[in-house]
Image (spheres, rainbow, N blue to C red):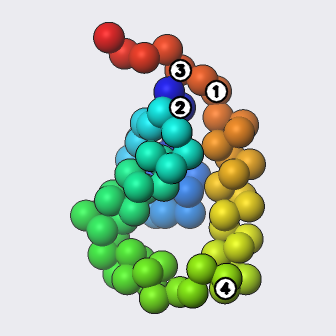
């Protein structure tokens, strides 16, 4: 389990998201974006996946995910 904040993922608040996998984190990030920053969510959704900004963002996200420390599951 790893945690990233909205700000780390390019957002504008400090909401913390936890996920087991990169895919789950992406999904949670998008969910949070839609709930908390709908305008930003709309912008991201309107962008083609091969847009240089998205490609760059994905690269950064991969690095951040790899660098995030593994947390013990909160049970
Ligand atoms: Zn946020």
Residue that carries the numbered disc 3 in the rendered image:
71
Q: Earlier in the sequence, mark 3 or mark 4?
A: 4
Residue that carries the numbered disc 1 in the rendered image:
69
- Quick check: marks 2 and 3 in contact, CB under 8 Å? yes
Q: Earlier in the sequence, mark 2 or mark 1?
A: 2
Residue that carries the numbered disc 4 in the rendered image:
51
- Residue 54 located left or right of residue 72: right
Residue 8: image location, x then y, percent: 58, 52
- Judged from the image, the secondary structure of the residue bearing numbered disc 4 is loop
- Judged from the image, the secondary structure of the residue bearing numbered disc 2 is strand
Quarter of the image where the C terminus is located: top left
- Quick check: marks 2 and 1 in contact, CB under 8 Å? yes
Find residue 20 and name its label.
none
Task: Determine whether the beta carbon of the residue marked 4 sits less than 8 angstroms from the nearest atom of ligand 1.
Answer: no
Vertical comparison of 16 with 9: above or below: above
Residue that carries the numbered disc 2 in the rendered image:
2
Crowding at mark 3 (Cα within 10 Å: few <14, some 14-19, many 20+): few
Vertical comparison of 46 with 29: above or below: below
- Residue 29 located left or right of residue 66: left
- Residue 42 located left or right of residue 44: left
- Real-space CA distance between mark 3 and mark 1, rounded to the nearest whole angstrom: 6 Å
Crowding at mark 2 (Cα within 10 Å: few <14, some 14-19, many 20+): some
Crowding at mark 4 (Cα within 10 Å: few <14, some 14-19, many 20+): few
- Name the residue at 37% across, 15% down: 74
- Real-space CA distance between mark 3 and mark 4, rounded to the nearest whole angstrom: 33 Å
Q: Earlier in the sequence, mark 4 or mark 2?
A: 2
Give the foreground label among 3 and 4. Answer: 4
Residue 73: image location, x then y, percent: 42, 17
């Amino acid at each position: 389990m790893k945690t990233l904040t909205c700000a780390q993922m390019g957002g504008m608040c400090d909401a913390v998201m936890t996920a087991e996998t990169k895919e789950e984190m992406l999904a949670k990030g998008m969910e949070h974006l839609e709930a908390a920053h709908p305008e930003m969510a709309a912008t991201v959704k309107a962008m083609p996946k091969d847009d240089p900004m998205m490609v760059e963002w994905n690269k950064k996200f991969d690095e951040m995910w790899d660098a995030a420390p593994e947390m013990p599951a909160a049970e």
